[in-house]
Image (cartoon, rainbow, N blue to C red):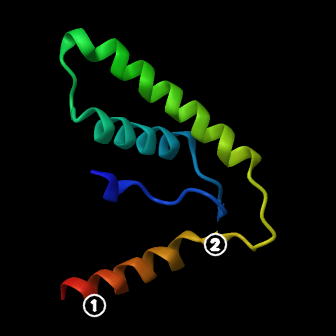
Amino acid sequence: MCRNIRTLYNFEPAATSDEVNAAALQFVRKISGFTKPSKVNEAAFDNAVSGVAAVAAELLETLVTAAPPKNREVEAAKARARATSRFG
């Protein structure tokens, strides 16, 4: 599951709230072991996703770098090239 979590920092354009929420969802799924929680655990699961997303968004807003922003398309092409060399 965590393989779907991508780096969200230092990209132009900046990460959207949907991307942050998707990463938070994947993180909570991984540590809880649930892809979809039961009704009794649904509130705790959703609360955890909201909390992780809020902290992640705060982190992304407060980080500082001198490096120029990365281009999403270039980084995606690099990832595809790595996958091709690894998996054929």
Examine the image and state in which quarter residue 58 appears: top right
Crowding at dot 2, Cα within 10 Å, few <14 / some 14-19 / many 20+, comes out as some
Q: Are marks 1 and 2 in contact (CB under 8 Å)?
A: no
- Spatial distance from mark 1 to mark 2, Cα to Cα? 22 Å
Q: Residues within 10 Å of mark 1 (few under 14, many from 20)?
A: few
The total of numbered circles placed on residues is 2
Residue identified by numbered label 2: 70
Residue 64, compared with residue 58, is above or below; it is: below
Of the numbered discs 1 and 2, the one sitting upstream in the chain is 2
**Residue drawn 75% across and 73% down?**
67
Residue at image location 26% in from the left, 15% down from the top: 41
What number is the disc on residue 36? none
| Horizontal side of residue 74 vs 65, given as left or right | left
Q: Residue at x 53, y 34 (%)?
A: 53
Residue visible at 43% across and 81% down in the picture:
77
Would you name the residue on which mark 1 appears? 85
